[in-house]
Amino acid sequence: LALAGVDPARLAEFAGEPLLGGGEPVGCVRPVEALSPEALPSACA
């Protein structure tokens, strides 16, 4: 996750609602996307 620009500490804040995507962006990737195998650093659009 760190390689994708996602801060694990920020991601953990949203761990309680992964199916909702957290409601806020974490870096450029929403938590549910960051946890997905398809998530790539280039996902920041």
Image (cartoon, rainbow, N blue to C red):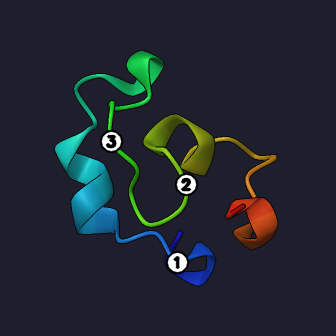
Which callout, 1 or 2, points at the residue further toward the start of the chain?
1
Instruction: Tell me: 33 left or right of 17.
Output: right
Q: Is residue 28 above or below residue 24?
A: below
Which callout, 3 or 1, points at the residue further toward the start of the chain?
1
Q: Is residue 45 above or below residue 33?
A: below
Q: Residue furthest top?
A: 19
Helix, strand or loop status at disc 2:
loop
Q: Where residue 40 sits: x, y (%)? A: 77, 63
Instruction: Tell me: 15 left or right of 34.
Output: left
**In the image, what residue type sits under mark 3?**
Glu
Instruction: Tell me: 44 left or right of 40.
Output: left
Residue depth check, mark 3 versus mark 1: number of the one nearer the observer: 3
Question: Which residue is under mark 2?
Answer: 29
**In the image, what residue type sits under mark 1?**
Gly
Residue in the picture at 32% in, 53% down = 11
Which callout, 3 or 2, points at the residue further toward the start of the chain?
3
Q: How many marks?
A: 3
**Mark 1 touching mark 2, by CB under 8 A?**
yes
Q: Where residue 25 sits: x, y (%)? A: 40, 50
Helix, strand or loop status at disc 3:
loop
Question: Which residue is under mark 1?
Answer: 5
Question: Which residue is under mark 3?
Answer: 24
